[in-house]
Image: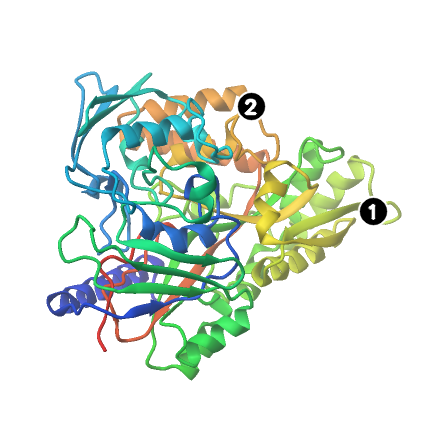
Amino acid sequence: MISARLWVKSILLCIGLSFVAEAPAQKAGGILRRANDENPPSASLHEEGSNIVTTPFVPVFNNLVTFDAAKSISRPDQLLPDLATSWSWSADNKTLTFKLRRGVVWHDGKPFTAADVKCTWDTVTEKRSAGWRKSPRKAWYANLQEVVVETDDQVSFRLKRPQPSFLGFFAAGWSVVYPCHVDGRQMRQKPIGTGPFMVKSFEPGKMIRLVKNPNYFKPGLPYLDGIDMPIISSPSTRNLAFVAGDTDIYTPSATLLAEVKAKRPDAICDVGLSYAYTRLIINRTVPPFDDVRIRRAMALAIDRDAVVRVKGAGLDRLGGELMPPPEGAWGLDKADLVTLPGYALPLEKRREEARRLMREAGYGPDKPLTFVLSTRDVARYRDTSVLILDHLAKIHMKGEMKTIDTAIWTNVVFKRAYTVAIGSRGQAIDDPDVSFYESFSCGSRGNVDGYCDKDMEALFEKQSAMIDPVARKKLVKEIDRKLQLDVVRPTITFAALPYCRRAYVKGYVPSLNNQYSNLRMETVWLDK
C-alpha cells in the first residue's frame, strides 16, 4: 500500500505538472459554476466562521499578502505580495511594516489606502466600531499593540513582543482588507472589496452571483467573466448537479467520490486532507460534564476507526488539535496519538475503563447519563452524530440528537447554548498560534466550551515567542497532548476531501492543508 507521505507527494507532483502545462494558454471569458453547500448567514468574512461564507466571498477581496494559488500546500515561508508590495521587520522583531500598492480602488471607485488597513484591524480588535458583530478572530491579535498609518501607502503593526507567526496571519482566507467607508450592515449584504470579482447579487437560499472587476489591479486578471453559485443544501442534489453538467467544480463527501467517478469518469478529482476536523464539544461549565472523569470516559468510548470507515470512506485520518503530518507541520503523529485516551488499547479495553469512570461518577446500567447532542443540520454531521451516540450508549450514556440550522449554528455554539455537540473547525492556516489563541485562550469568542487554564495560557505565550522552530514544535506537541488528555474538544477525525472539477476548468489548484486558501479564483479559466 502506498504510504501517506508518498501519496501526498504524488498528488502535489501531479497538480504541479498540471498547472505548469495549463499556464501558457489561458482564455478569457465564461462563467464558472459551483454550488454553495448552504445558505451563508451573511457575506461578511470578518464576522463569520464557516467556509460557506469564504467560498463565495473570498473572491471579492484581497489580503495584504497571500499564499501561492499554484501550490496546494500553503506554508508561511512562501508568501506572495497582494495589496502589499513588500514587508519588513524592525531590528527588535516587534514592528511589521507593509509597503502598499498605489492606484488600487475599491469596487465603488474610492481609493484604497493604509487607512483602510488600520480600520480593518482596529475593528477586528474592537478598538473601532463599524457596526460589525464581534470577530471570531480577535484573539489572533492579542499581541498586537497598535496599527500605525505611516503614509497613504505604508502601514505598521506594532507588537508587544516578537511573534514569528504574525506575518502568516495576513495570508489567511479570513484576513481580507475591508474599506473604511462601508459599514457592517452593507458588508453583510453586498460587500465592497478590491478583489477580482464584485457581488452582483446575493439572494439568500437561492443564488450568489459575482461578476468580473474591470478595474482589478492585477493586469489581465481575472480570466472569468463571473462566478455563479446556486445554494444547494442537499448533498444528493449537489451530486446530481455536477453529474448532469450544471456545475463545474464540486467538493463531494468522501463517501460520494466513487459515485462521482463512476458517473463522470472525465472529472478530475484530487483527494487531499482538509484542515477541517470533526470534534466532540463538551460544555464543561454544565454539570456533570465539569467532571473530568465523564469527559475522559467519552473520549475513551469513541470508535474513531468506525467514523473513518463510515463517514470518511476510509480516507479520513486521525490527529490531535493540529493537522497531522505530512500535510501539517506541527501536529501529533501516530506515535504521539497512541499515548492518548481514545487511541491506545483495543476498543473494548478502552470502553471497560470508560464504564469504570462512569460508575465512579455515579452512573451505570440502571442510571444512565441522559443528554442532548446538538449538531448542524447537515448530512455529514448528522451521520457522525448517530455514530457517536451509539458509541456513548456503550458506556451508560443515553443521548438524543438535536439538529440546528447552519444559519444559527455558529451563534448557538459561541453562546454555549448546548450541552454536548458534534461540530467541526476549519483552521485558517497551519500554525499553532491560530489554533491556541482562537480556540483555547480564556477570553476568545472561539473558546466555545468555557475552557480556561492559566498555565496553558503561559505555554501558548511561550511557544508563540519561540524563534527556533524545532524547539517550538516540541513544545507545541506537548501542549496538544495536554489538551487531548484534559479532553478539551477531542478531535474525532480530520476530513479527507475530494476536490472535483471538469477537465475544462484550468488553473484551479485545491489547497490541501487548509480550507480557505486558493478560493480567490483569479487565475482560473475555462478551456471551452
Element class at badge 1: loop
Q: Position of residue 358 (x, y in %)?
A: 76, 41
Identify the residue position indicated by label 1 in the image: 368
Q: Is residue 176 above or below residue 196?
A: above
User: At label 2, which amino acid type do we have?
Assistant: Asp
Q: Position of residue 297 (x, y in %)?
A: 68, 42
Is 441 situated left or right of 55 in this image? Answer: right
Residue 330 visible? The answer is yes
Identify the residue position indicated by label 2 in the image: 453
Q: Is residue 481 above or below residue 501?
A: above
The alpha-carbon separation of the residues under discs 1 and 2 comes to 30 Å
Q: What residue is rendered at 39% in x and 66% in y?
A: 34
Q: Give the quadrant of residue 505.
A: bottom left
Is 103 situated left or right of 359 in this image? Answer: left
User: At label 1, which amino acid type do we have?
Assistant: Pro
Judged from this view, the residue extending furthest toward the front is: 109
The foreground one among 212 and 52 is 212
Disc 1 versus disc 2: nearer the observer: 2
Tag count in the figure? 2
Residue 326 visible? The answer is no
Q: Position of residue 92 (x, y in %)?
A: 21, 16
CA neighbours of label 1 inside 10 A, class few (<14), some (14 to 19), many (20+):
some
Q: Say which mark, if any, is on residue 236.
A: none
Do the numbered discs 1 and 2 sit on residues whose CB atoms are within 8 Å?
Answer: no
CA neighbours of label 2 inside 10 A, class few (<14), some (14 to 19), many (20+):
few
